[in-house]
Amino acid sequence: MKCETLRKRIRENPSYLKAGILLAVSVVCFAGMYIGDNSRKLETNGQGEQILERPEEGEERTQGMHVKIGDREEDITVSVSERQYNDEERKQAFKEAEKNIGTLILGENESLDEVRSDLDLITEIPDTGISVSWQADRYDVIDTQGHLQEEELEEEGTVVKLTAVFGYEGEKASCEFYIKVFPPLRSDDEKLMKDLEDRLVQSDEETKTENYMILPERIDGEAVHWDYGKNTRAAAVLILGTGAAFMLIISESQRKKEDDRKSARQMQLDYPKIINKFNLYIRSGMTIRRAWFLIAKDYEKKCGEKNRRRAYEEMVSTMHQIQGGIPEGECYEKFGVRCRLSVYRKFGSMLAQNLRKGSGGLTELLSREAEEAFEDRKNLAKKLGEEAGTKLMIPLFLMLIVVFAIVIIPAFFSIRI
């Protein structure tokens, strides 16, 4: 029965099968790794002593071990350094290094008999632990890093003796070999520009005591025409100005959206007050027009330049339209459209329809609308409270970072190693 229920669940939800397969694979991998990691036995040498194998040359590793001394047990970490050469192996390693060093330093060159670009004078033979230092008999041609000094190179080539000094655990060996260094290969255009640069340097040196520098008129038999380079300041100003204009447009658009959002939220907050006042006046026996005018005029008396509220401003505008002779119902509907919020559209349509059909039932409609507005006002207040709490989290996190810095930084500098 249980198997049938399980099969049914798997058919209805295939994710059960995937989860089961994943769990089974995890269990198998765990078992294999656990057995492999914990079933190893220490090897012994010919004298029966337990041993740890050393890593290859140039490496070092640590091995977690469990040790038992008498009744005491503890987990420790054992550092195992690399295996070192014995005398015979060291000599053989030096011979191999001497044989291969010429190939290892070639870099982009094809042969040491024709060196036209920098050599890669390595400081260590890979995978051996053997260090290398360099000496040259012509440092004016090549330095100890293998960089060519192009100013001193000759077309027929310059022979340089390089000496590689190998070092391993205090033991040293050296080998000498010769290379032939040539100027880099350049295209005709590159040669022409190099000659031009050399002539400009020469002209600058020759006219240092003058108020001007003479520009060469011919290079390698070809005429040279000079003019001031194109200045990109104008383009930079255009690009910056265009970017600033776009940023201004975007910022203005964002500011307008933010203003509209704040205005809409303000109108949402004002709506319950407006509907409650209107409901109170209608219940006291006033007409729709009289109640509207009373709310609008009361706002005009109390409002200052800095305390303007859009919903009330629209009510004042509607009052002036009615006084100007525009049909009252049409003014209420336009009021709802201008406010751009559904609650105000509903309010304006309610008043316009009631004027056309008569005032019966308006008090009940306004009462229900006031209750709904009050509930919406509570929900909005709760939402604003949550947003305010979220915004407060940013300064709290910044304060937490500052506190951590005050506590950790002095402690860090007080550590003595």
Image: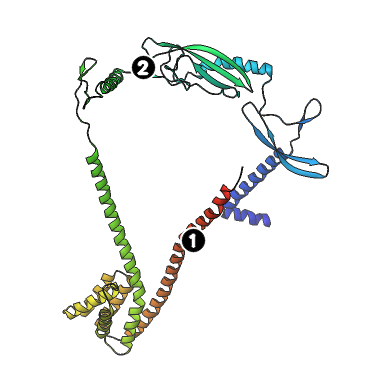
Q: Can you see residue 14? A: no
* Front residue of 313 and 200: 200
* Front residue of 100 and 157: 157
Q: Amino acid at mark 1?
A: Leu
Query: Going by the picture, which residue comes out furthest to the right?
Result: 70
Query: Which residue has dot 1 on it?
Result: 396
Task: From the top left corner, tell me how far across and down residue 137 is, in percent.
Answer: 47, 14
**Of the numbered discs in the image, which one, if any, rests on residue 185?**
2
Helix, strand or loop under label 2: loop
Which numbered disc, 2 or 1, marks the residue that appears first in the sequence? 2
Q: Amino acid at mark 2?
A: Leu
How many marks overall? 2
Q: Is residue 257 left or right of residue 39?
A: left
Rate crowding at label 2 as few (under 14), some (14 to 19) or many (20 or more) other CA atoms within 10 Å: few
**Residue drawn at point x = 31 percent, y = 61 percent:** 257
Rate crowding at label 1 as few (under 14), some (14 to 19) or many (20 or more) other CA atoms within 10 Å: few
**Residue drawn at point x = 24 percent, y = 47 percent:** 241
* Front residue of 243 and 179: 179
Q: Is residue 88 left or right of residue 18?
A: right
Q: Is residue 246 left or right of residue 380?
A: left
**Of the numbered discs in the image, which one, if any, rests on residue 228?**
none
Query: Going by the picture, which residue comes out furthest to the bottom?
Result: 285
Is 64 situated above or below 11? above
The quadrant the C terminus occupies is top right
